[in-house]
Amino acid sequence: MTKIVTSADFEATIASGVTLVDMYADWCGPCQRLAPIVEDLASDYEGKANICKLNVDDSNDIATKFGVMSIPTILIFKDGKLVEKAVGLQEKEHLASLLDKHLA
């Protein structure tokens, strides 16, 4: 199960290691199609990377801070710093390659 983060625990979640954050909203069709891909990544990268989701409607301050204008947007952080940003529906293989680049 993918962890849901909010404004309250976002900074602590991304502080160390590699973290993928799926910026989504419940009403977003492409976000719903991306959800099973993110779930698969959470299983594949368990123990290697943090995979989580953030609802932009509930945590708009975080979306604004990182310039998220369209959803879904995938943000990848390494030790608290934004290192990758992918906007729109993404292939699992593409997201895995972005994660692998920062885990190497």
Image (cartoon, rainbow, N blue to C red):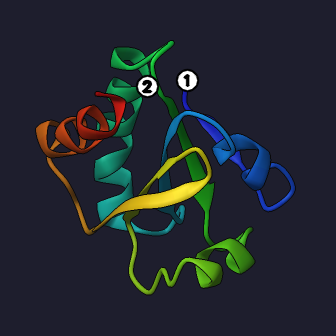
Q: Is residue 24 left or right of residue 3?
A: left
Q: Position of residue 92 (x, y in %)?
A: 19, 38
| Identity of the residue drawn at 75% across and 54% down | 11
Mark 1 residue element: loop
Q: Nearer the viewer, mark 1 or mark 2?
A: 2
Q: Quadrant of residue 45?
A: top left
Q: Amino acid at mark 1?
A: Met
Front-most of 4 and 30?
4
Q: Measured along the vertical axis of the image, is residue 103 above or below residue 29?
A: above
Residue on which the image places disc 2:
42
Front-most of 2 and 102?
102
| Identity of the residue drawn at 48% across and 61% down | 82
Quick one: label 1 or label 2, which is nearer the N terminus?
1
Q: Position of residue 37 (x, y in %)?
A: 29, 37
Query: What label sits on residue 63 in the rendered view?
Result: none
Judge the density around disc 1: few (<14), some (14-19), many (≥20) Cα neighbours within 10 Å: few
Quarter of the image that includes the C terminus: top left
Q: Measured along the vertical axis of the image, is residue 43 above or below residue 81?
A: above
Judge the density around disc 2: few (<14), some (14-19), many (≥20) Cα neighbours within 10 Å: many
Q: Amino acid at mark 2?
A: Ala
Q: Position of residue 23 (x, y in %)?
A: 50, 62
Residue on which the image places disc 1:
1
Mark 2 residue element: helix
Q: Position of residue 90 (x, y in %)?
A: 19, 54
Residues at discs 1 and 2 in contact (Cβ within 8 Å): yes
Quarter of the image that includes the N terminus: top right
Q: Is residue 50 left or right of residue 98?
A: right
Q: Is residue 84 left or right of residue 19?
A: left
Front-most of 30 and 23?
23
| Identity of the residue drawn at 37% across and 38% down | 38
Q: CA distance from mark 1 to mark 2?
A: 7 Å
Front-most of 9 and 30?
9
